[in-house]
Image: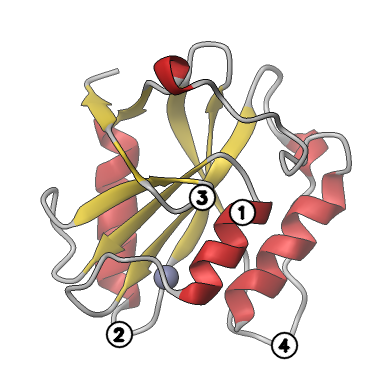
Amino acid sequence: MGILDALRNAFGAGGSSGSSGAKKAKEKDFRYTISREVLETAIAAARESHPHEFIALLGGNRRKKHISELVFLPSVTGGVSAVIHMDMLPIGMSVFGTIHSHPTPNPTPSLQDLETFSKRGILHVIIAYPYTMQSWRAYRSDGSLVELEVVEW
Ligand code: ZN
């Protein structure tokens, strides 16, 4: 429940950087990379959050199609609204989508995940229990699986 609200607030806060209006990438252009360090950080955070869900935003360079940053959402579970000021992101950095964990071995997006995916960004990652480099999957905004290459930069 809290995740969608947090995202709504996060994406709504900055205005111009919201990616809900981003046009769909063409099939052949849908090749994204993620920094190994970013993925490992997210996996560690997922582990620490267990059995609760961890969620963050995927940030990076949209032109290079490279995910190089995790943007943490403050206080997703608390009653306080999570607010991220997108205009505070480094210049040239934009938000691709979301990354969150499932406390079960099932990395399949839930119905709520699919709703979130369709509205918030173009690329989403789910890290399932037991939170390893093998237990995550990447999805497009329509919930279909997509390859996401892990790179060392
Ligand atoms: Zn989920």
Q: Which residue is mark 4?
A: 79
Q: Which residue is mark 2?
A: 51
Left-right relation of 38 to 88: left
- Residue 142 is marked as 3
Instruction: From the top left corner, tell me how far across and down residue 123 is, in percent.
Output: 48, 41
Of the residues tagged 3 and 2, which is closer to the observer?
3
The disc, 2 or 4, on the residue closer to the chain's N-terminal end is 2
Of 91 and 33, nearer the camera is 33
Res 45 → quadrant: bottom left
- Residue 64 is marked as none
The disc, 3 or 2, on the residue closer to the chain's N-terminal end is 2
Q: Rounded to the nearest whole Å, what is the CA distance between mark 2 and mark 4?
A: 19 Å
At label 4, the amino acid type is Gly
The disc, 3 or 1, on the residue closer to the chain's N-terminal end is 1
Instruction: From the top left corner, tell me how far across and down residue 33 is, in percent.
Output: 34, 24
Q: Residue at x 58, y 83 (%)?
A: 77
Q: Which residue is mark 1?
A: 118
